[in-house]
Image (cartoon, rainbow, N blue to C red):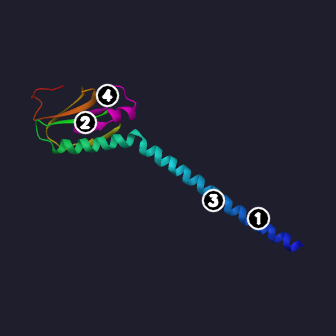
Amino acid sequence: MMKCFIDDRKAVTQVLEVVLFIILNLIFIASLIVFVNRAGSSSAVLEQAYTKELAVAIDMAKPGTIISVNIEELAKKTGNSEKSNLINFRNSRISVGKYKYSVFTGYDIEVCAVKDSGINQARVYVHKNKEEKRLC
């Protein structure tokens, strides 16, 4: 009779170990999904994408080029009501929010916030030199 009781205790211990292992794995996977969802939907990813795309477009642009960017989604994600501060250009660096990227163009760059057909946009003007007429 005693031998049967000891076997039952071992079986219960093994079942508890398996159940605990499954619960811990589910908690880990759930926290991983929450982290990935938050990281992917944050404004930092969007800022980085806008910055890199603008840097490539500016590097390839010739004088007289106007680059228009729809910043509605970016403004919503960042919660920035002042659209003129979203995209800046200083010292050969384009910045969108907190993210900055270097630009290798020798031309003068001008960034403006405009509202075209009810859509908030940022326009990037590429000038040959600083003496050219400003469009903002």
Looking at numbered disc 4 in the image, what kind of residue is underneath it? Answer: Lys
Looking at numbered disc 3 in the image, what kind of residue is underneath it? Answer: Ile
Question: Is 94 a magenta residue?
Answer: yes
Is residue 15 toward the left or the right of residue 25 in the image?
right
Is residue 33 toward the left or the right of residue 92 in the image?
right
Q: Give coordinates of residue 2: x percent, y percent.
A: 89, 72
| Residue 102 appears anywhere in the view | no
Q: Quickly name the residue at label 2.
A: 69
Q: Quickly name the residue at label 4.
A: 83
Question: Secondary structure under badge 4?
Answer: helix
Residue span colored magenta:
72-97
Q: Of callouts 2 and 3, which one flags the residue occurring earlier in the amino acid sequence?
A: 3
Q: Residue at x 75, y 64 (%)?
A: 13
Q: Quickly name the residue at label 1.
A: 12
Q: Give coordinates of residue 38: x percent, y percent.
A: 47, 43
Residue contact at pointers 1 and 2, CB within 8 angstroms: no
